[in-house]
Amino acid sequence: MTSIESLAAVLETHHDADEIARVIDAYEFARDAHTGQFRKTGEEYINHPLETALILADLRLDIHSIQAALLHDTIEDCEDVTFDTIKDRFGEEVAVLVDGVTKLGRIEFETQTQQQSESMRKMLIAMASDIRVILIKLADRLHNMRTLDALPPKTQIEKSRETMEIFAPLAHRLGMSQIKWELEDLAFHHLNPEKYEEISQMVKQSRDERDAYAERVMGEIDVALREVGIEGDIQGRPKHFHSIYQKMINKGKDFSEIYDLLALRIIVDNIKDVYGALGTVHNIYTPMPGRFKDYVAMPKFNMYQSLHTTVIGPVGSPLEIQIRTKEMHRMAEYGVAAHWRYKEGTAAGTFDERLAWLRQMLEWQTELDDPSEFMEELKIDLFQEEVFVFTPTGDVKSLKRGATPLDFAFHIHTEVGFYCVGAKVNGAIVPLGYELQNGDRVEILTNKSTRPSRDWLNIVKTSSARSKIKAYFKKIDHMAVRVTPEELAKRDAKAEPQVAQHPKKRNRRNAGIRIEGLEHPLVKLARCCNPVPGDDIIGFVTRGRGVSVHRKACPNAESLTRSPERMIEVAWDGDPQAVYQVEVMVKAVDRLRLLQDVTALVADAGVDIISSSSYAHPDGMVDMRYLFEMGNLSSLDGIIKDLRGIPGVFEAHRKLPSEAS
């Protein structure tokens, strides 16, 4: 059983006497507050906060964290202790930490899921300002799991499942591998005791042989490193029971086929020696193809850095080796707990960058109203495996495995996501639903006229992107609800004159063209360039078909001017009865219901579609051509702008004379 003396002994290695005295003061306050309270194990309740504080002391956290760990259950379990009580006695910083860890136990909730969700929300919000909240909570959960046998079987299962689904993945996301492995093994022990015991026995039976093999390999590597002048600490890495079980299940392998039961770490002084040690290892043992990973150049989302290689050992069996510096090893074992103290120092920018995933989680979780949805999204994000991709400038971004270019766009910035119309991966256009792979170079194509589509909710894979899209449409829907029937009537009234100005009967005699000296001339607007009022035009007298009018920029105009005797001056006469044909070209990323969206927009604008065609390219892009008939040309620019706003549309414009039909 832990005592305050044993806690003080650990603190003496990195804290002064005044700080230790403040910890003892917090202990005495918590001890008195918990007087008469006992745990299910039969021990005095104060032992639990003491053990929690000791876990954090081993992680070398600051005095405020240790004090908060000792006090973390006082507000919840002691009626006379409030936030203000803690604040007045130990300061606001300690009080905020305690309050962040405190569950919402005194508030009535309709369901257990709602209570769990709201407690987790509160903790995440507290994490936004101080990461130490979750560190205290993880230490609290770890000690509770160590003493779980004292609780009823049903509670053991519930707590173990919650630990496996939330707290162990959260420890992993924070890079705290020591706590993560122990939480998983403790939960595994209660969730599947038979399989846990089976694996435990198999590991014990093979331990002697494995230890002897490890000693031989470590000796050979040590000699090889010394020969090239590299000082390295070589350690065996224990394989945890739940990890072994996961490999057996996920890869369908027997225990005897799990070759990385034996794994070694080489810990060196600097990055140069990390890569030097890798070369040395590959020089004495043959590396297995496809089994090398460089997490030094491309760190994991949880700040983990190390080289991983698998080689064929001296007896022909595979051997996994990790190589890292001492600082990388501290980060791998303690994660953010080893790094949080730099938050207020010169490395603050690096710290915040490495916890970007946490900021994003805090951003999207506030948008979810349904407690069950929040918990499910949280579990998905915590469990996610990652994929590394590159920006056009070479920056590395980590995303959830299975993420799409649309997820990448929202990861870069919310507006980049909203304006996304397409993406290039490794220089080629890809659909927005393309699954990103490690090493992909991703470029997002944007158009500020575009807006999100509800179909995007079926494309994105990350909770962050999904929540931003949902928030956008929630806002849009809210605005739509606020439009009154009177306002709708006014809008319809304004639209009616535009419809009235669009006659269905076309004046085909002169097509809105004036020719000096001729009354009611037979005029035809050339279909090769479809001129409309405002275009510079030329007239050409045809044989038996009147005057053909072309745009001056029309490719056919050059050949016509070779017969100057048949050229004639023409001008627009502003005939209100004239109807014109306009050809519009649309370039878009092919997607479901794209054609339907484009056609519906044109129809809503009161425009007749004479003909249309489309061509889908192998790279996922599609070219569409529309021939419109319209009288009110003033609306053309608005239609083109609206077309550009359709999700997936990259460009829309009136057909240029040089473009092929």
Image (tube, helix red, strand yellow):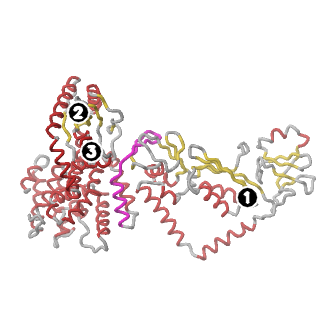
Q: In this view, does 502 lie to the left or right of 9?
A: right
Q: Where is residue 659 in the image (x, y as percent from the top left)?
A: 70, 43
Q: Where is residue 146 in the image (x, y as percent from the top left)?
A: 16, 57
Kind of residue at disc 2:
Asp
Secondary structure, mark 2, is loop
Along the viewing direction, whichever of 137 and 438 lies nearer the viewer = 438
Residue position for label 1: 633
Secondary structure, mark 1, is helix
**Residue farthest along the top direction in this orientation:** 227
Mark 1 Cα shell of 10 Å, populated few (<14), some (14-19), many (≥20): some
Quadrant (top left/top right/bottom left/bottom right) for the N terminus: bottom left
Please give the name of the residue rendered at 27% of the width and 73% of the height, measured from the top-left corner.
Answer: 107
Please give the name of the residue rendered at 46% of the width and 39% of the height, measured from the top-left corner.
Answer: 393
Disc 2 to disc 3, C-alpha distance: 38 Å
Name the quadrant containing residue 484.
bottom right
Q: What stretch is highlighted in magenta?
A: 371-397
Kind of residue at disc 3:
Asp
Name the quadrant containing residue 521.
bottom right
Q: Earlier in the sequence, mark 2 or mark 1?
A: 2
Kind of residue at disc 1:
Leu
Please give the name of the residue rendered at 29% of the width and 46% of the height, measured from the top-left corner.
Answer: 247
